[in-house]
C-alpha cells in the first residue's frame, strides 16, 4: 500500500493510536517507548503490513523539524542552576568526545570490514563516515528515558547527560557532512574544515542566545488577547531560529537548544501553558519521527548486517564510549569512578544517528550508503534494548540513584507576577502535637493553608478543621524563610517549596 493524500490521515491516526497504546504497555516492562515507536513503524512498513515509504529526503525533513522541537523543549526544561557546575564536562563530551568516538570506532570498523563473510569492505573514509554518523548520543532518547522514568541521580548526572546529548549533535553533523564532502571530492583542506566547524558552533551559540532573549522580550510584550496564540508564536520562533541560523551558516540544532535554555530560565507570560503545549508536542514529534524512520527501513535487510552490527554496537558500548568518557573527564574531579561508568553506559543511540545516516543515503558519491544506513539502524535498536532498558537498573547497581522530590499533590502554579512562595506538606503526628485543628498550627504571619487533600478528596479548610495524619496541605506564604523555620520546628523534613521571585 502506498501512502498518499487519500489515506495518510487514516494511516497516520491509526499508527499514532497504536504507538501510544504500545508505549503504555511497554512502560510496564521497562521497554523504552521510543524503541516501541520504531518497532511499530517497522511492522507497518514494506516488510510488514506493506506501507511503502522510500523517501530519505522526507524522513530527513521530518527529523529536522522534530529535532528542533525536541531540543528546544529539552532546553526549556533544563535549569541554568543545574547545568552551570557541569558546563565544562558537558561541552568537552559534546565536542572532543564526539571526535574521539568517531576516530576510535572508525578505526575498528575499518579493521573488521574486510574480515566479515559477506565480503563487505569499507574504505578508511567510509568507516570514519559511518562512525561519525553514530558518534553523538541521541537527545530524544536521553530526554525521554530519563524524564519519563522519573530517574533521580546523584553527582549531577542527569543535567550532564542532558547537556551532552542536547549539544553534541552539531559536532556529529559537521563531521558527517565534512566526510561526505571529502569522499566526494577526494581531498580535504583541514584548516578550512576546522574553521568551518568553529564557525558553525560559534554562530549557532550566538544566534541561540540572541534569538532566545529576543523571543522572551517579544512574547512578554506583544500582549495577544487570545492566550492560545502564545504557543503558536513560540513555535514560530523555534522554526525561525533554526532556519535563520542555518542561513548564517551556523548550526541550527545548537541554536534552538540554547534558545530553549534562555526561554525556559526567564519569566514568561503564560509559561505553564507554553510548557504544557511543548511537552505534548514534543511527544508527538518523537512518535512521528520514530514511526517515519521505522517505515524507511526494510527489516529483511537488517538480517544481512547482524554480524557487523553486533560487533560495532557492542564495541561502542563496551570500549569506545567508556574510553572516550574516561579520557574527556580526566580534568574534572567532581565525578566519581562510578559516575563516569554510568555516563559511559548512558551513551544512547536513537533517532539522530538514523537521521544523519540519511545524508549519505541521498548522496550519490557514497557507494555503500544503504549498508551504512542499515548498520546504523541495527545499532540503534541494540543500544535502545541493551542500554535503554537498563538505565535505571545501572544507576541502582552503581549506587547513583536517589530519592526523587516528592510528586506534587496539588497541580497549582503561581503566576510570575505574584511574589509569594507556595509549598506542600504532609501532616505527621509531630505536626499535631499542639492540637489536631488547623488553628493549632503555629504558622508565620501572611501564611495561609488554602487547601487540604485527604485521600482522594480536596477541600478548603477553616480554623476549626480537624487535621489527620497523612493529610496533604497546600500552603501559601509571603515569608518563606520564616515558614521553613516553622516547618523545622514542627518536625517536617520533606516538603516542596515553589518560590516566585
Image: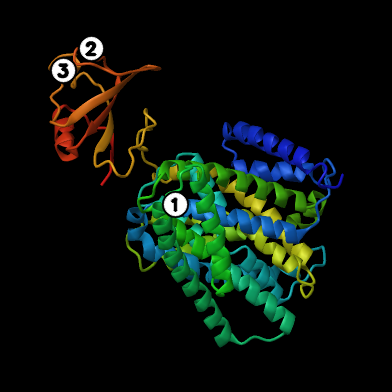
Q: Nearer the viewer, residue 495 or 373?
A: 495
Q: Is residue 12 left or right of residue 404?
A: right
User: Left or right of 146: which side holds 417?
Assistant: left
Q: In this figure, which residue is indicated by the disc labeled 2?
A: 466
Vertical placement of 195 versus 304: above or below?
below
In the rendered structure, are the residues bearing label 3 and label 2 in contact, judged by CB atoms less than 8 Å apart?
no
Q: Which mark is residue 263?
A: none
Query: Is residue 432 toward the left or the right of residue 59 in the image?
Result: left
Is residue 187 toward the left or the right of residue 346 in the image?
Answer: right
**Helix or strand or loop: what does disc 2 sit on?**
loop
Q: Position of residue 407 (x, y in %)?
A: 38, 32
- Picture residue at 24% right of the left edge, 42% below the top: 419
Whole-angstrom CA distance, mark 1 to mark 3, is 41 Å
- The image's mark for residue 76 is 1
- Of the numbered discs 3 and 2, the one sitting upstream in the chain is 3
Front residue of this view, candidates 423 and 274:
274
The residue tagged with tag 1: helix, strand or loop? Answer: helix
Amino acid at each position: 500500500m502506498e501512502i498518499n493524500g487519500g489515506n495518510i490521515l487514516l494511516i497516520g491516526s491509526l499508527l499514532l493510536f497504536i504507538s501510544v497504546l504500545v508505549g503504555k504497555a511497554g512502560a510496564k516492562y521497562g521497554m523504552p517507548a521510543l524503541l516501541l515507536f520504531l518497532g511499530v513503524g517497522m511492522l507497518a512498513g514494506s516488510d510488514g503490513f506493506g506501507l511503502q515509504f522510500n523517501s530519505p529526503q522526507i524522513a530527513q525533513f521530518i527529523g529536522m523539524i522534530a529535532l528542533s522541537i525536541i531540543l528546544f523543549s529539552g532546553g526549556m526544561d533544563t535549569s541554568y542552576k543545574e547545568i552551570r557546575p557541569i558546563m565544562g564536562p558537558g561541552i568537552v563530551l559534546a565536542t572532543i568526545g564526539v571526535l574521539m568516538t568517531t576516530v576510535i570506532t572508525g578505526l575498528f570498523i575499518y579493521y573488521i570490514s574486510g574480515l566479515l563473510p559477506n565480503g563487505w569492505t569499507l574504505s578508511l573514509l567510509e568507516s570514519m563516515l559511518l562512525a561519525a554518523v553514530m558518534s553523538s548520543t541521541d537527545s530524544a532518547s536521553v530526554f525521554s528515558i530519563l524524564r519519563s522514568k522519573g530517574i533521580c541521580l546523584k553527582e549531577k548526572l542527569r543535567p550532564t547527560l542532558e547537556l551532552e546529548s542536547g549539544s553534541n549533535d552539531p559536532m556529529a553533523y559537521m563531521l558527517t557532512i565534512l566526510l561526505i564532502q571529502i569522499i566526494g571530492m577526494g581531498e580535504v583542506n583541514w584548516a578550512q574544515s576546522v574553521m568551518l566547524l568553529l564557525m558553525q558552533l560559534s554562530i549557532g551559540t550566538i544566534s541561540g542566545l540572541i534569538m532566545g532573549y529576543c523571543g522572551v522580550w517579544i512574547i512578554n510584550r506583544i500582549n495577544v488577547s487570545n492566550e492560545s496564540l502564545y504557543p503558536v508564536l513560540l513555535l514560530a520562533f523555534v522554526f525561525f531560529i533554526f532556519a535563520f541560523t542555518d542561513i548564517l551558516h551556523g548550526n541550527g540544532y545548537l541554536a534552538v537548544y540554547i534558545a530553549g535554555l534562555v526561554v525556559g530560565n526567564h519569566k514568561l507570560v503564560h509559561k505553564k501553558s507554553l510548557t504544557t503545549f511543548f511537552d505534548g508536542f514534543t511527544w508527538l514529534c518523537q512518535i512521528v519521527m520514530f514511526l517515519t524512520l521505522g517505515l524507511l527501513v526494510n527489516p529483511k535487510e537488517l538480517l544481512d548486517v547482524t554480524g557487523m552490527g553486533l560487533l560495532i554496537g557492542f564495541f561502542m558500548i563496551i570500549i569506545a564510549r567508556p574510553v572516550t568518557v574516561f579520557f574527556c573527564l580526566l580534568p574534572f574531579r567532581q565525578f566519581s569512578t562510578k559516575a563516569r561508568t554510568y555516563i559511559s553506559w548512558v551513551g544512547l543511540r536513537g533517532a539522530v544517528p538514523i537521521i544523519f545516516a540519511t545524508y549519505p543515503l541521498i548522496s550519490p558519491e557514497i557507494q555503500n550508503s544503504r549498508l551504512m544506513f542499515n548498520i546504523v539502524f541495527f545499532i540503534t535498536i541494540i543500544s535502545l534494548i541493551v542500554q535503554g532498558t537498563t538505565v535505571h537498573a545501572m544507576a541502582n547497581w552503581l549506587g547513583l540513584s536517589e530519592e526523587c522530590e516528592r510528586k506534587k499533590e496539588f497541580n497549582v502554579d503561581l503566576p510570575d507576577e505574584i511574589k509569594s512562595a507556595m509549598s506542600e506538606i504532609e501532616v505527621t503526628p509531630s505536626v499535631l502535637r499542639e492540637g489536631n485543628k488547623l488553628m493549632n498550627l503555629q504558622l508565620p504571619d501572611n501564611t495561609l493553608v488554602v487547601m487540604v487533600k485527604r485521600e482522594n478528596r480536596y477541600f478548603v479548610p477553616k480554623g476549626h478543621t480537624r487535621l489527620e495524619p497523612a493529610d496533604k496541605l497546600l500552603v501559601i506564604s509571603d515569608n518563606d524563610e520564616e515558614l521553613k523555620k516553622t516547618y523545622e520546628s514542627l518536625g517536617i523534613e520533606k516538603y516542596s517549596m515553589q518560590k516566585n521571585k
